[in-house]
Image (cartoon, rainbow, N blue to C red):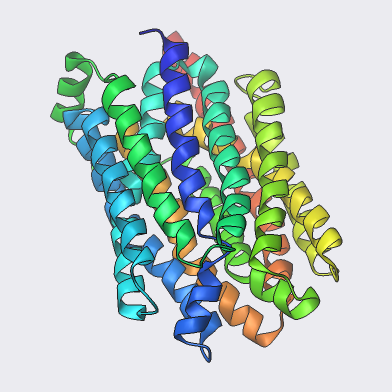
Amino acid sequence: MNKDKRLGIVMIMLMTTFIGFGIIIPVLPELIKEASPDKVEFHTGFMLSVYSLVAFLISPMWGGLSDRIGRRPVILIGVLGFAASFLLFGIADGSLPIMYASRVLGGLFSGAVTSVIVAYVADITPPEQRTKGMGLVGMSIGLGFTIGPGFGGLLSLVSQNTPFFAAAALSLVTFFIAVTKLPESLTPDMRQSTHERKPSRWSAFTGSVKYLYMLALIVSLSLSGLEATLQLFGMKRFDVTPLQVGFMFLICGLVGALIQGGIVRKRIRKGQEPAYMAAGLIISAVGFLLLVTAHSLLSATIYLAVFGIGNALIRPCVTSLITQNTTVGQGVASGLSSSMDSLGRIIGPLLGAFLYSLNLTLPYVSGGLLSLAALVLLLRFKMLDRSKDAVKPTASAS
């Protein structure tokens, strides 16, 4: 099977997985509100963080395992685990312990899907086409988030639990697509050589690449703080409903998918990623700070879309640069990248909920400032990367 067909299959898998993930966004705070009306902010933030804490600890293990036994079996395990986690939340029936158990289960298997699919794409795309491949990954995730929250908002009209059952069903569809259509990306030779190296996950956190991991952490932290508080912010400012939250994320996801499918996939060439990342960080900061001024559904949706443009430029570029510059297996590198994303999602919801409790605009002010601060990390990466390139000709001459 040629590369384009395999990319098409993993795009479909990512899109269906993130449709399932996005379906639950509009109803999660409402279900928590029914179970614990006095601590909605705390449990919303903590439930998102528990999921990410487990993913942070486990994702590199999945990535390293996929380097040894292959991507396909790990992806299959992850998709089935996702289905089970959604189903468990759907039958929680107001029980906070079962809700938390579902989030732990989802975090356990999340790295087996997202980070290993990123490694799969890195396997089948040469470095000069890597940004294009990661743009397709980002577009698929963006489309999933585009369709998911809107679909979840509509399904919430049936019942608050219906989106979770729909997410479980979509995960099973994704599993059958993988079983029947997804070939292995690692050849026996690649698998054996990776197995012999057995690098530590943290061995990837060296040189100029460490600044990219730190940048990915900041982007994830600020994004997850927004996700954890946006519905609460909207409920205070303009009485937002789950259906309207779904609509807001629908617009944001659609804009992001268009950027990643257009600009990132078609225009960004190898070596141009840092410039587009800098633009993305500035645009994200503008979107965050504009959200502070939002007092209507329309203005909040427009400002969220501005943020979505910036985020869509950053994420595929940083992932591409990490996979281009890593000195360890793609699975380990992608697993550590997923861990940084998860670490941000551990801190972000808790920090966002805390800042929201102080002032409802603080999560967005801090998000804007963090986006601008991340420009320093990007500059450090460029300086060290340039120094590394300057050393290579000297070494060759000697």
Observer-nearest of 144 and 315: 144
The quadrant where residue 1 appears? top left
Q: Which residue is at a point 47% across and 51% down the rendered structure image?
A: 21
Observer-nearest of 319 and 1: 1
The answer to whether 23 appears left or right of 369 in the picture is left
Observer-nearest of 257 and 201: 257
Residue 357 in the image: x percent, y percent?
63, 85
The answer to whether 254 appears left or right of 3 in the picture is right
Residue 61 in the image: x percent, y percent?
24, 46
Q: Does 212 sit above or below residue 299?
A: above
Q: Which residue is at a point 29% across and 19% down the rendered structure image?
A: 183
Residue 258 in the image: x percent, y percent?
70, 32
Q: Which residue is at a point 57% across and 77% down the rendered structure image?
A: 353
Q: Which residue is at a point 31% across and 78% down the rendered structure image?
A: 97
Q: Does 345 sit above or below residue 325?
A: below
Q: Does 324 sit above or below residue 151?
A: above
